[in-house]
Image (cartoon, helix red, strand yellow):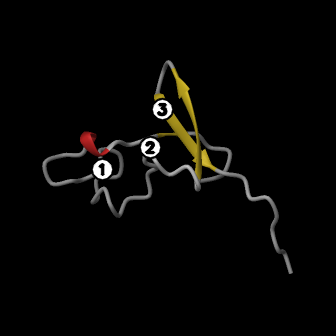
């Protein structure tokens, strides 16, 4: 996921009876989809169309050396 791409947040209660994510269809604990409590890694926004969305936080600095 690119830093500027907003994606839908997945909640654990949306998983199927086997605990699979409804978006990527793998185990919720192993999927790359953002959850609702990952504040250190993601920033969040609420939209009327999609509900809660998240995107990766911007890095403050990078080391290109």
Position of residue 37 in the picture relative to residue 12 (left or right): right
Q: Which residue is mark 2?
A: 36
Give yes or no for contact between labels 3 and 2 (Cβ–Cβ under 8 Å): yes
Query: At which x and y percent is residue 3?
Result: 66, 51
Position of residue 12 in the picture relative to residue 1 (left or right): left
Sequence-wise, the earlier of marks 1 and 2 is 1
Q: Which residue is rendered at x = 82% and y = 74% of the image? A: 63
Above or below 27: residue 57: above
Sequence-wise, the earlier of marks 3 and 1 is 1
Position of residue 61 in the picture relative to residue 31 (left or right): right
Check disc 3: other Cα within 10 Å, few if <14, some if 14-19, many if 20+: some
Query: Which is more foreground, mark 1 or mark 2?
Result: 2
Q: Which residue is mark 1?
A: 21
Number of numbered tags placed on the structure image: 3
Above or below 44: residue 34: below
**Circle 1 SS class:** loop
**Circle 3 SS class:** strand
**Circle 2 SS class:** loop
Q: CA distance from mark 3 to mark 2?
A: 8 Å
Query: Which is more foreground, mark 3 or mark 2?
Result: 2
């Amino acid at each position: 996921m690119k830093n500027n791409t907003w994606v839908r947040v997945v909640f654990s209660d949306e998983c199927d009876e086997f605990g699979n994510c409804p978006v990527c269809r793998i185990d919720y604990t192993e999927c790359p989809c953002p959850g609702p409590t990952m504040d250190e890694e993601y920033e969040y926004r609420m939209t009327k169309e999609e509900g809660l969305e998240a995107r990766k936080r911007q890095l403050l600095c990078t080391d290109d050396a």
